[in-house]
């Protein structure tokens, strides 16, 4: 199949004249990104939600071992959280379609905070309440991981419509950088407090 489709794409694909031309330098385009207000809001939400979730993630090993005293069940508890994250994605998408992405993301942020508070209230050595709290955190993380890039895509379209930096790749690179920055800050916060 590949051997047939590549020559057809080369012959029938867009000509060189149809390619968008770069206007200005990458630095000029990067300077246009802050003019896109909705994208800047998505960056802020992405940074803060990633920071909050990953500070939790950085300290969960120590919390489960030292406070909950469930060293032997640590991997099972984390597996439960990760499976909940994956299984929540279809639910998140249906909620977003029904109630809107902004509301669903807000519910995800509140759910993550509630799950962390509930985990703090779990008595030492009790597996089921700890697992239930981590399921709530995991489902909420699914909302954060799916909806922040989805909202970024809308903000990128808005920027292209308003003639801000039209390069979608540039916007996604900035979002990726901010997410990685939040990850690094979260690890440092978690490391400093453990």
Image (tube, grey):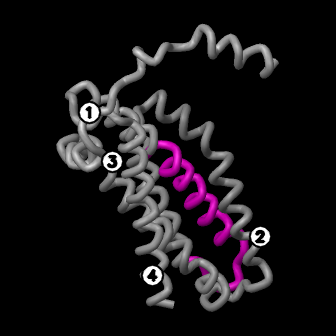
Return the residue at label 1: 23
**Disc 2 element:** helix
Quadrant that contains the N terminus: top right
37 versus 45 height, above or below: above
Return the residue at label 4: 188
Q: Earlier in the sequence, mark 4 or mark 2?
A: 2
Residue displayed at 47% across by 28% down? 98
Out of 127 and 86, give the one closest to the viewer. Answer: 86
Q: Earlier in the sequence, mark 3 or mark 2?
A: 3
Q: Report x, y in % for residue 72.
A: 79, 83
Q: Earlier in the sequence, mark 3 or mark 1?
A: 1
Out of 26 and 127, give the one closest to the viewer. Answer: 26
Return the residue at label 3: 42
Return the residue at label 2: 76
Q: Nearer the viewer, mark 3 or mark 2?
A: 3
Look at the image and say whether residue 119 sits in the magenta stretch.
no
Q: Residues within 10 Å of mark 2 (few under 14, many from 20)?
A: few
Q: Report x, y in % for residue 174.
A: 37, 51
Residue displayed at 33% across by 27% down? 21
Residue displayed at 57% across by 58% down? 136
């Amino acid at each position: 199949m590949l051997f047939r489709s590549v020559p057809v794409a080369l012959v029938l694909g867009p000509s060189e004249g149809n390619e968008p031309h770069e206007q200005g330098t990458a630095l000029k385009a990067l300077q246009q990104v802050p003019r896109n207000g909705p994208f800047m809001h998505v960056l802020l939400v992405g940074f803060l939600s990633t920071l909050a979730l990953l500070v939790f993630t950085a300290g969960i090993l120590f919390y489960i071992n030292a406070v909950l005293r469930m060293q032997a069940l640590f991997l099972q508890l984390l597996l439960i959280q990760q499976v909940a994250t994956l299984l929540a994605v279809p639910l998140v998408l249906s909620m977003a379609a029904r109630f809107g992405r902004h509301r669903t993301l807000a519910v995800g942020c509140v759910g993550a905070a509630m799950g962390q508070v509930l985990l703090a209230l779990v008595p030492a050595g009790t597996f089921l309440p700890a697992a239930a709290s981590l399921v709530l955190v995991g489902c909420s993380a699914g909302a954060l991981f799916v909806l922040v890039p989805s909202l970024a895509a809308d903000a990128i379209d808005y920027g292209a419509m308003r003639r801000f930096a039209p390069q979608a790749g540039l916007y996604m690179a900035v979002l990726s950088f901010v997410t990685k920055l939040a990850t690094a800050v979260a690890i440092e916060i978690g490391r400093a407090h453990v």
